[in-house]
Amino acid sequence: MLTENRDEMRERIIDAALKRFTYYGASKTTMSEIAEDLHCSKASLYYYFPDKQALHIAALEKAGETYFLDLREKANAAATARQALMELIAVRHEFARRFCRLELFKVLKDRQLVRFAHEAFENAREREIKLITDIIEKGAARGELVTAEPEKVAALYMHAMIGLRLSLVNKDISEEISDAEFERVREWQVQLADIFINSLKK
Amino acid sequence: MLTENRDEMRERIIDAALKRFTYYGASKTTMSEIAEDLHCSKASLYYYFPDKQALHIAALEKAGETYFLDLREKANAAATARQALMELIAVRHEFARRFCRLELFKVLKDRQLVRFAHEAFENAREREIKLITDIIEKGAARGELVTAEPEKVAALYMHAMIGLRLSLVNKDISEEISDAEFERVREWQVQLADIFINSLKK
DNA sequence: TTTCTGACTTTTTTAGTTACAAAGTCAAAA
DNA sequence: TTTTGACTTTGTAACTAAAAAAGTCAGAAA
C-alpha cells in the first residue's frame, strides 16, 4: 500500500490518542479505548507504534510542533518586540490551558520517558529561547531595545516566565487548575514582560 | 515551676526537633528519636506539644523567624536598593540550602497542615514582599529608582524569584539538590534582580 | 505484500490484608 | 507541676491475589 495511507493512519491514531490524552491524561487512557474510538483493533495500533510510550511521544511531539508553528507565526507578524513578546505569552497561555492534562509532567515518573522528556523539554526551551533572542535582536536592530547579550537575556526571560507559572500555581499535579488561575498567571507574565522591555530600553 | 523553665524546655524540644527535621526531614524523624536526643521520655514531648504536627509547625516558625530577622537586618544595612536586593538573594540562598530538607513542601500532603502551611506561606511571602517594597521605596526616596507602584513591582519580583528557583531545579522533591544547582539559581536571580533594578531606573 | 485482527501471554495496577512501627494516652511517680 | 513506663490506637510498608491493561503473534483480509 502507498506510504501516504500509512502516514495517514499514523496521523489518525495520533489525533485520536491526543484527544483522549488531552481530556483524561495519558495514564487514564487505554490502548483499547483509542482503538475503539478509531473502530479498529488494539493490535492495529501496535502495527503503527511499537508501544504506548512511542504513541505518547508522537502525540506530545505533534502538540509541540503545532505550538511552535503558532509561536513563530505570531512572533513574525508582530510589529514591535513588545508586541511579539505579548503574542508569545498569549500563545503559551492557550497552549497551557489546552494541554495541561496531557501529563507533560507526570511523564517524568516513567524511567524510560525521563530521558526523552528531559531532552524534549530542553529542546523546546532552547527553541523558544532562540525565538525570543530573535525578537530581542530584531528590536535592537530597529533601535527599540538595547542589549549586549540578547541570548542571555532571552534565557533569563524564558525561565522567569516558566517560573512565574510554577510559583503562582502552587498546586499538586493531580489538582485541576482553574481558568481564573490561568488568567492570573497571564497577567503577571505581561507585567514581567514589560519590566524586561523597559529594562532593555535603557 | 517558673514559666521560663517551661518555655526553655519548649525551646530545647524545638531545637532538637529542628536539628532532626533539617537533616532527615520531618517524616523520617520519630518522636522517640527526638526524646532520645533530649534524654527524656517521649511522653514528655506530649506534655509540651499536643502532637507532632504542632511541634513541626513550631519548628518551621522558628526557622522562618530566624530567616526574617536576618533578611531585615541585612536589608537595612545595605546602602543602595540594588545592594539590599542582592543581600536578600544571599540570605534566601543560605536559608534554602540549609532547610531544603525541612519538608516545607512535603508538608502539603498532610490535610490538616495544608491550612496552616498555605496560610504561613502566604504570610511569609507577604512579609518578604513588604520588605522588598520598603527597599524599592527607599530607593525611590533616594532618587535611585522610579516607580509608580512599588508594592506591585515587589510582588512581581518576589514571584519571579521564587519561580526562577522552581524553574531551574526542575526535580522531584525526593531528589537531592546539588550545590552547583543552588549556585546556578543564585546567579540567575542576581541577573533578574539587575533587570528589575535597571527597569526601575527608567 | 501490506494491513489488520481475535485470541493469546505478560506485565502493571489496584484493592485488600497483615504485621510492625510510630503516634498518642494515661495513671501514677518524682 | 513535670516526668515517665506501660499501654492503646493509628498509620505505613511489605505481601498477596485479582483484575486490568499492555503487548504478541499466527493467520485472515485486502
Image: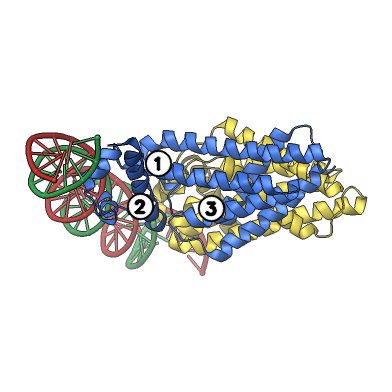
Chain colours: A yellow, B blue, C red, D green
**Which is nearer the eye, B49 or B3?**
B3
Neighbor class of circle 2 (other Cα within 10 Å; few <14, some 14-19, many 20+) is some
Element assignment for label 3: helix
| Quarter of the figure with residue D22 | bottom left
Element assignment for label 2: helix
In the shown orientation, is residue D12 left or right of residue B171? left
Q: What amino acid type is highlighted by mark number 2?
A: Ala
Residue located 79% across and 32% down the image: B148
Is residue A36 among the parts visible in the rendering? no
| Quarter of the figure with residue A198 | top right
Q: Position of residue B81 (x, y in %)?
A: 74, 46
**Separation of disc 1 and disc 3 at Cα?**
17 Å
**Which is nearer the eye, B131 or A34?**
B131
Name the N-terminal-most of marks 2 and 1: 2
Residue linked to disc 1: B58
Residue located 81% across and 40% down the image: B142
Residue linked to disc 2: B16
Residue linked to disc 3: B95
Q: What amino acid type is highlighted by mark number 1?
A: Ala
In the shown orientation, is residue D5 left or right of residue D10? left
Q: Position of residue A26 (x, y in %)?
A: 46, 48
